[in-house]
Amino acid sequence: HDKMKGISSLAARRKSKVDNYREEIVVRKSGKFLYTLAYIVVWVFIVIFGFFALMDLSVLMGLNFEVASIIRLILYGGLAVFLFYYKDNLRTEYEYTFTNGEIDFAKVLGNRRRKNLMSLRMREVEAGGYVTSAQFERYGAMRDVKKINYFLNSSDELYFLYFIREGRKQLLVFEPSQTMVDMMRQYSKVLDA
């Protein structure tokens, strides 16, 4: 009977770990039309600059080496490549993953590329709360504090976490749901209500 009790408590601990998992994806709520329009315009310029670069490349392939053609090829080709890599920044999402007292932040570009930004254990957090609080203003006004913004939508629902890592004061602002805030509070007693 004691062996069964030990197994059931182990199963309860595993179940509780599964219960403390949440993943949220933050997308832009306002200005979507402008960002979509900018994305289309960037693609148009990529095609135009790429076309001009190919025209100058064909001149050079005809063994007609002109300094102006080389400069235009580098300029137009460089602009086309730069815009090609920049375009995904117009379609940015943030992903927050909370697992048993640790929150991971990632940036998703163009629904294709995922860049891990940081992981933070709740026991590292020295203070936290909504950005509308006086506590946020106090930490934000501190000297030598590094401000980290992982949000897309400005609102009163933004949340901050203050922590010190490797001797550097850091103030992270993001936009979790109330459910995630409640989960974070289970692992940190320094978070404001």
Image (cartoon, rainbow, N blue to C red):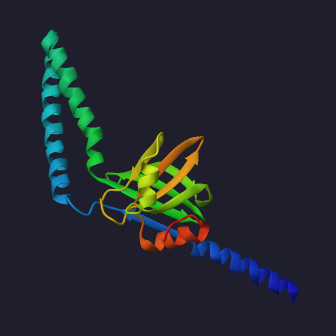
Horizontal and vertical percent position of residue 35:
20, 53
Foreground of the two, 11 or 57: 11
Residue shown at the point (36%, 56%) measured from the top left: 151
Eyeballing the image, is 80 above or below 10? above
Eyeballing the image, is 27 above or below 79? below
Residue 114 visible somewhere in the drawing: no
Residue shown at the point (22%, 21%) measured from the top left: 74
Quadrant location of residue 50? top left
Foreground of the two, 102 or 111: 102
Residue 9 visible somewhere in the drawing: yes
Horizontal and vertical percent position of residue 111:
34, 55
Residue shown at the point (38%, 53%) measured from the top left: 108
- Count of marks placed on residues: 0
For this orientation, the residue located farthest to the right is 2
Eyeballing the image, is 22 above or below 70? below
Residue shown at the point (42%, 50%) measured from the top left: 140
82 sits to left or right of 63: right
Horizontal and vertical percent position of residue 36:
18, 54
Horizontal and vertical percent position of residue 60:
17, 15
Eyeballing the image, is 70 above or below 4? above
Quarter of the figure that contains the N terminus = bottom right
For this orientation, the residue located farthest to the bottom is 1
Foreground of the two, 168 or 89: 168
Foreground of the two, 173 or 132: 132
